[in-house]
Image (spheres, helix red, strand yellow):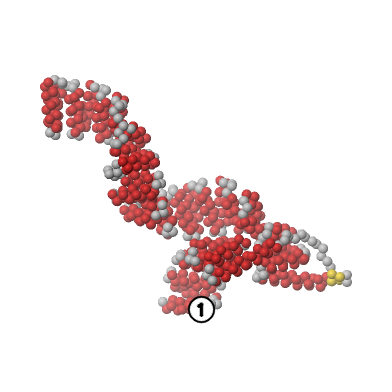
Amino acid sequence: MEPEASSLYQEACTLEYQHDYTSAVEKLKKAIEISPEDTILLTKLAGIYTDLNEYDNAVKIYEKVIEIKPNDAFIYISLGSIFETQGKYKESLAAYEKALNIFPEYKYNYLNLANVQYQIKDYKSAIENYNLFLNTYSQHWEARKSLANSYLVDNNPEKAVQEFEKLYTENNEHFDDYANFGIALFKTENYEKAIEFLEKAVEKDMDNMTAKVCLALSYQAIEKNEMALAQFNAIFKQDSKLDSIRYDYANLLADMSKNEQAIEEYKKYIAAYPKDSRAYKNLGTVYKRENDIKNAIVNFEKSLSLNNNDTETKKAIAECYHLDGNYDEAIKYYDEILALNSDDTDTKINKAIALHASEKYSEAIYLYNKILEERNSEIVQNNLSDAIISQSRIYLETGDFSNAIEGFVKAISRGTKDSYAYFGLAKAYRSTGIYDKATEYYEKAISMNPDEKEYSAEYADFISAINSTKEKEITSDGIKEISLIVDGGASDNSYIENIEKNKSLIKQGNECYKNKKYDEAIKLYKEALMLKPSDEETLLRIGNAYKLKNDEKNAIDFYKKSIFVKPEYADGWFNLGLVYADQKNIVQSKKCFEKTISINPKYAYAYYALGMANETEENNELAIENYEKFLKYNTDSSAKETVEARLNNLKKE
């Protein structure tokens, strides 16, 4: 550098120190005119241009320096810094990489590279270079924070948590990234700890919506439902259009049994995201819980149209069709499930029950037998016997007495507890003229079910007919003998013992029920149910006991079971309606009471209950109509006075 140029350089440095950058530039330009190839002068001028934000001028000067001194790594680093400031990340990255090639020992350049790579979302490269930098400068907290955030956005929350832990443990006084640490913890499903940091993040920044959402979801994940609900409500108050989280919000409402709200939120989510099969599936599940089977089916069908391989949804829709009495559709879905998993025994059982309920007895019997080859089940055993009896009953009604006898004998040999098997066998033997066997099985049927008037009446008719026939068949040679013989069934001692035990358990249960010992009554009824699983009256008794214990969930469950085993069981429908009425579920209660009346049009108290429901809905005209029907069929004098009083009040309004 020429002496004059050196003097100008010193003056420029003084001016720069005094922040008189314009004068400093003029001095340097004069010095460069004297020593145009001096890289010290050029570098100083480029630096001052950078401080003045005159980046284009600075770049031109640095490029001139590179022409003179092409292997100066720090010139490339200065260029990279300018390009990074200008957002020219491609050029910045190229400059930093050139510096790295020239001077790989300069570790700070790894931080430069990583910062640019983070900006261009090349997170894997950024992570590699942050780690290379931190191998030397392990206490550089900003670099570690950037590394943690790189792991987070690169979907490696476990590594992000490790880095945030180091930051928080070793530098907690200056730690401020509660939000991202909390989000990383949330993504690793460490919900308790995530809540700790997310609460701090939300307190610090009320507008951080991501932290708020993760906080709500963390509460939800550990079933702090009320806190989750409050957080979701706060989020939607702040941003009512944040539809992306309505699915989780609806799930929370459903878990909290806020079914109507859940339905509305699922619908809003579906409006925004109509291709998400999960939303339709969960909406269908809520409708099913509400016993709105039609809407449940609609949504399950839509879910399957978007994701036809979801076996759980197929099971749900099959069950809905089954409950709705559409057995053919139920069977169709059971077959689809079995096509995907032929070893699904539970689905086979449900299919067999659907075949059974749709009176396809031969197919049901075949499938029940196949199931029993895989798994011994008392329910399947009982259902098989019932299907055999039902099939035999059809044979009996159509005059196929040989197959009827074979079927009834098979059911009895299997230990059926259904007295009709004995009665049907007696009828078949009577029709084929085997009167001694007919007599034997009439008597067994009556001993098993002495309250069944049909058995006694037909047996009396049979005895009368036999006596009449015998009188007519007496000849001079004596009484005409009937020689046709058919083998009978197995011993019925154990079966009769079970029947007596069943009656004894029910009697004991009734006594406990009367004395308000409901838990003991339930236990005894359930033991009785093991001996006669399809006894709708015992199922009803259990439901009644649960209802008196205020256990509405179990009460509903057993009332539903009673009408499942006997769909035309009026008492089961009526009592189910009462529970729904207690729950203020007027729509479902009315459906049950209307079903009760369709089965038994003279069921007085169903009209009474409907009248009360009509009053609740302020439909006085219909309430009056139902109360009047109650009075028409009622035999309870005390209830009569109450209803008459209600009628008088309604008619005055």
Residue 637 in sight: yes
Nearer the observer, 561 or 577: 561
Looking at the rendering, in which quadrant would you find the N terminus? top left
- Residue drawn at (56%, 69%) of the image: 512
Q: Can see residue 597?
A: no
Residue drawn at (34%, 49%), measured in percent from left and top?
196
Alpha-carbon neighbours of circle 1 within 10 Å: few (<14), some, or many (≥20)?
Answer: few
Classify 180 as above or below 26.
Answer: below
| Residue at position x 60%, y 69% in the image | 507
Q: Is residue 344 left or right of residue 48?
A: right
* Quarter of image, res 228: bottom left
Residue 317's spot in the image, x, y percent?
52, 53
Instruction: Using the image as rendered, state which of residue 166 and residue 14 is in the foreground.
Output: 166
Residue 438 position in % (x across, y down): 74, 65
> In the rendered image of this protein, does residue 141 appear above or below residue 472?
above
In the displayed orientation, state which residue is furthest to the top: 2
Residue 244: % across, % down? 38, 49
Callout 1, which amino acid? Ser
Q: Residue at x 18, y 22 (%)?
A: 38
Q: Is residue 286 left or right of residue 541?
A: left
Total count of labels: 1
Q: Residue furthest front?
A: 170
| Residue where numbered disc 1 is placed | 638
Q: Residue furthest right?
A: 476
| Residue 24 % position (x, y) | 13, 30
Quarter of the image where the C terminus is located: bottom left
* Between 312 and 391, the one nearer to me in the picture: 312
- Mark 1 secondary-structure assignment: helix
The image quarter in which residue 170 lies: top left
Compared to 438, does 182 lie above or below?
Answer: above
Viewer-side residue, 278 vs 1:
1
